[in-house]
């Protein structure tokens, strides 16, 4: 069975439950039966959804006495929406994987962590901008469902990075410093400097860019008070939270992610394997609701609602 057939089979009893054709107390047996009849379901993301989120929702329903059918219905609807998002995933049996030696623009993407950001906090702060969400009121955060998530005080846009070799560095003559906009922000980790040097000497590196996350932040925690029978919230500020830095190498022609808009591409992703379609939107971190740099694809004329995070991508091939 292809992944699309597996997705359709697994979604069957969930749709039947939403339509009222299956009693909630019959749902567990239907789920078990469908999973047993579906070949290789466990090897797909749909099987993972089915085996974790669906069964957890049903188990919680039984544990709570089977009273909150509406909550179970909402959870199943949410899972079905995620099934729909992944319906645009290109199955291995449905698309040929093109090779990089063909006469098409091809980029291999490598990521490396940046060390030593703690000692460059002042320079990093000069590169950041204030996050307007950080100062929002509690009621605004609740209304926009921004609870139980980290809200950074500062935002850092993806920027070009420069690698500076330091042969006279007294601690490590192989040290490679990372500069952004003329400011030093950290170093390549010692165990990865040889790999970086090899990439630079044997490959055409289209561009190196840097993304910084973390730093001071706040979280609006949510909870429930049985005594008051209402939701309660607590805002916690984390002034000493550490910055995290990531260097991205695009090995191939010089490129910017936004230049891929309107291009037909094939993307090999670390988590979701392979995608194929036309890029209709590029989101940088400040545009994306999840705070991730991402691409959105139009697949066979259908704009996908699923974001493909750039940090998950292993390669990009332009098919035009």
Image: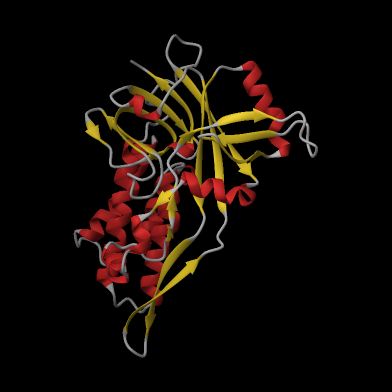
**Extreme residue in the right direction:** 170
Residue 251: % across, % down: 53, 22
**Extreme residue in the top direction:** 103
Residue placed at 54% from the left, 34% from the top? 182
Rendered image quadrant of residue 280? top left
Colour setup of the view: secondary structure
**Foreground residue, 299 or 115?**
115
Residue placed at 20% from the left, 60% from the top? 21
Residue 270: % across, % down: 50, 37
Residue placed at 55% from the left, 52% from the top? 243
Q: Where 262 falls versus 75 (above or below)?
A: above
- The answer to whether residue 36 of the structure is visible from this angle is no
Residue 26: % across, % down: 31, 66
Rendered image quadrant of residue 167? top right
Q: Answer with left or right where residue 256 lies relative to residue 101.
A: left
Q: Where 91 falls versus 115 (above or below)?
A: above
Q: Where 131 falls versus 96 (above or below)?
A: below
Residue 104: % across, % down: 42, 13
């Amino acid at each position: 069975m292809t992944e699309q057939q597996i997705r359709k089979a697994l979604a069957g009893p969930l749709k039947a439950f939403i339509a009222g054709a299956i009693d909630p107390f019959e749902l567990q047996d239907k789920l078990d039966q469908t999973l047993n009849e579906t070949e290789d379901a466990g090897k797909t993301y749909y099987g993972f959804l089915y085996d974790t989120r669906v069964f957890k929702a049903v188990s919680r329903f039984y544990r709570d006495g089977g009273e909150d059918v509406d909550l179970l219905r909402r959870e199943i609807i949410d899972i079905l929406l995620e099934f729909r998002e992944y319906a645009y995933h290109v199955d291995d049996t449905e698309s040929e994987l093109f090779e990089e030696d063909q006469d098409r623009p091809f980029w291999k993407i490598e990521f490396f962590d940046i060390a030593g950001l703690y000692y460059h906090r002042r320079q990093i702060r000069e590169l950041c901008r204030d996050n307007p969400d950080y100062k929002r009121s509690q009621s605004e955060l609740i209304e926009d469902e921004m609870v139980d998530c980290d809200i950074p005080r500062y935002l850092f846009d993806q920027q070009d990075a420069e690698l500076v070799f330091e042969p006279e560095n007294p601690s490590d003559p192989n040290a490679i410093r990372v500069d952004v906009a003329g400011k030093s922000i950290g170093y390549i980790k010692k165990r990865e400097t040889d790999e970086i040097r090899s990439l630079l000497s044997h490959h055409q590196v289209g561009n190196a860019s840097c993304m910084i996350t973390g730093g001071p932040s706040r979280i609006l925690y949510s909870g429930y008070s049985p005594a008051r029978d209402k939701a309660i919230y607590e805002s916690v500020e984390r002034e000493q939270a550490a910055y995290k830095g990531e260097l991205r190498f695009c090995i191939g022609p010089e490129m910017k992610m936004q230049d891929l808009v309107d291009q037909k591409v094939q993307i090999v992703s670390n988590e979701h394997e392979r995608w194929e379609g036309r890029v209709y939107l590029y989101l940088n971190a400040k545009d994306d609701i999840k705070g991730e740099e991402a691409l959105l694809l139009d697949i066979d004329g259908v704009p996908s609602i699923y974001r493909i995070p750039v940090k998950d991508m292993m390669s990009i091939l332009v098919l035009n």
